[in-house]
Amino acid sequence: MADSSDEPSGVGKGTSLFISYARADRERVRPLADGLAQAGYDVWWDALIDGGAAFAKVIEDKLEHAAAVIVVWSPTSINSDWVRDEAAHGRDRKRLVPVTLDGAEPPLGFRQYHALDLSAWNGRPDSPQFASLQRSIAALDGQAHNAPALVSAPGGQAGISRRTILLTGGGITLAAAIGGAAVLKPWRSARLRNAVAVLPFANLSGDGSQDYFAQGLSEEVRAALVRNADLKVAAPTSSNEFRDHKDDARTIAGKLKVDYLLDGSVRKAGDVVRIDATLTDAATGFASWTQSFDRKLDDIFALQREIADTVAGALLTRVAVSGKAPGGTAVVAAYDAFLRGRALFNADAGEQSDRSALARFDEAIALDPKFAAAHAARSRSLAAIASKYSPAAQIGAAYGAAVEAAHTAVALAPNLAAAQLALGFAMLNGFLDFKGARPAYEQAYAQGQGDADVLLMYAYFASKLGRGDEALEVVRRAERLDPLNARTFRAEASILLIARRYAEAIAAAERALAMNPALSSARSYTGTAQLMLGKNDAARAAFIAEPLKSVHLAGLAIVEKRLGNESAAQAAWQQLVASYGDSASYQQAQVLAQWGRGDDAVAALERAHAARDGGMASILGDPLLDPLHSAPRYNQLLMQMGLA
């Protein structure tokens, strides 16, 4: 029998709790730690839990003697060896109290244990969900009625009666950072069934030229649902994989990781449209509801809101999306032109398609000058044309027009995430203005939490600023919303590469390529990671397969040099310079840095900066530029860009 000093005698007032979590989740865990401390527990949590090569003595001691080990599962912590070790320790001592953030699935070895889903907890320690957590703690030693009582303050709110908190790191309190109706039950059934995918609506008009309308309607309904914070809505790229699906509802829902599918069809004739919509419960394969809507086109906006409200009501028994979308229009012809332009832009079929999209957005703006979403789309089109098709002498003017269009969109609809995103993108890629782009990206991120594309672009931006942990957490949220989009996993590979987590970067890139073998840049991330790991032959194979020619040539110039193939290295270099000239100055700098020609590499970066080379946005974390970090001119350039 163990000595009484080895195990806690009971779980009640003054009980010692150990919170195990990933450092990237620190700000989200803080309300939980504060709430438990206010409730009278002695709480220990370590802001450096992911660091180091072995358990620190103090961590081991606190973990060994804690009455309860609260493990906070999240998309980040499930990949943390530290959190897994601590969870195993708590499990083996029968002191494990697992909770989840965002409904993250615990890793293998822990899924058979009961978990509390706190994905919608309001942060209040007097909530029923928090009481469930206290009962779970108390139940470890059969003390279900001895959990510390909250001290009530006037007005019924919990008073602050703080016990000892041992903190080795900071953090800010976010009252609603962890949320949900928490119920003690196995993880899979504890999660609120609120995830929905809007599949592309079928065009039954018999006119292929009307496909854009059906597609646009499904996207608008999806956008309306995204505005409901209580719903998790799959992103369009993943949903659109099933445009012509023949799979059953359970199969599709399993691939998209959702609970419900919204499917529909559109028949458009003249100024009248009929929409049939069906919400299918993936658990049963049966329709939760089905409904037909007949409207004139001048009522199409009300129809979109009606469909979205009906879906939300069917899912959550309440509606929170009935307000008008920010940045929209009441002019049907303008909306029609906007949908046509968006279909052309999303097709990404080359210069003619992009310029035709721009013309459609211009048409929409001419019909409704206050149509903010059209101004934002115009900005993205101008930026794409500037980066892909404009001669060097015209790039500045094209990006300037993109910034102007984005400013107009922001002025018309400050709460439109697409407007803020367009502004940040144009300022960063057109003018390399990190400082100026940052507020726009932050605004877009705050407004577009349910939009996978917003999360994806914000993750890129955060990574380029050196905020790797945050970038990784955000891109993995985008992956949960858009699990079949290769671009999200390519972004994860880029972020992991910048973080010098090379093996993980290779795995993420391979996952992206498994979804889309023609994806550009992903193989270059693999090549660079293999290069940094000293696996030159594997790096060479990856660079050979890279379809983006300038990156392909730069990678070969580097790896052939490392392999001692001087003539092959020089041939790749000469082809890079001859084919791209100053437009590939950034790639030339990477080669020169790896060749040990530091001064020439910095000079190439200076040329790239002067030419507004978009590659310069990645300068801060690029491992191929590591040899330049001690060069004064290199650091002066970082200062000039606002990165140092």
Image (tube, rainbow, N blue to C red):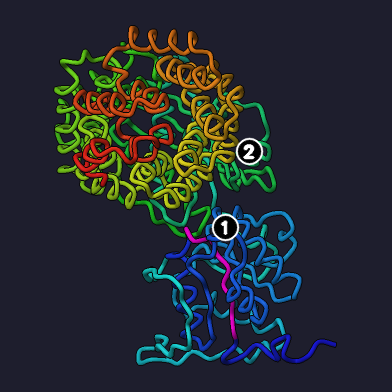
- Give the left or right position of residue 188, taking residue 47 as reference: right
Residue 378 makes an appearance in the image: no
**Residues rendered magenta in the picture:** 16-24
Residue 319, given in percent of the width and then of the height, sits at: 42, 56
The secondary element bearing badge 2 is classed as helix
Q: Nearer the viewer, residue 220 or 133?
A: 133
Q: Is residue 306 above or below residue 542?
A: below
Q: Quadrant of the N terminus?
A: bottom right
Q: Nearer the viewer, mark 2 or mark 1?
A: 1
Q: Which mark is residue 255?
A: 2
Q: Nearer the viewer, residue 171 or 13?
A: 171
Task: Please tell me whether residue 332 belongs to the stretch shown in magenta.
Answer: no
Identified at 47% across, 47% down, the residue is: 472
Task: Examine the image and state in which quarter residue 280 appears.
Answer: top right
Q: Is residue 37 above or below residue 24?
A: below
Specify few, some or many for label 2: CA neighbours under 10 Å numbering under 14, 14-19, or 20 or more: few
Task: Please tell me whether residue 20 belongs to the stretch shown in magenta.
Answer: yes
Q: Which residue is mark 1?
A: 77
Q: Nearer the viewer, residue 540 or 104?
A: 540
- Give the left or right position of residue 172, taking residue 47 as reference: left
Q: Amino acid at mark 1?
A: Ser
Task: Examine the image and state in which quarter residue 98 appears.
Answer: bottom right
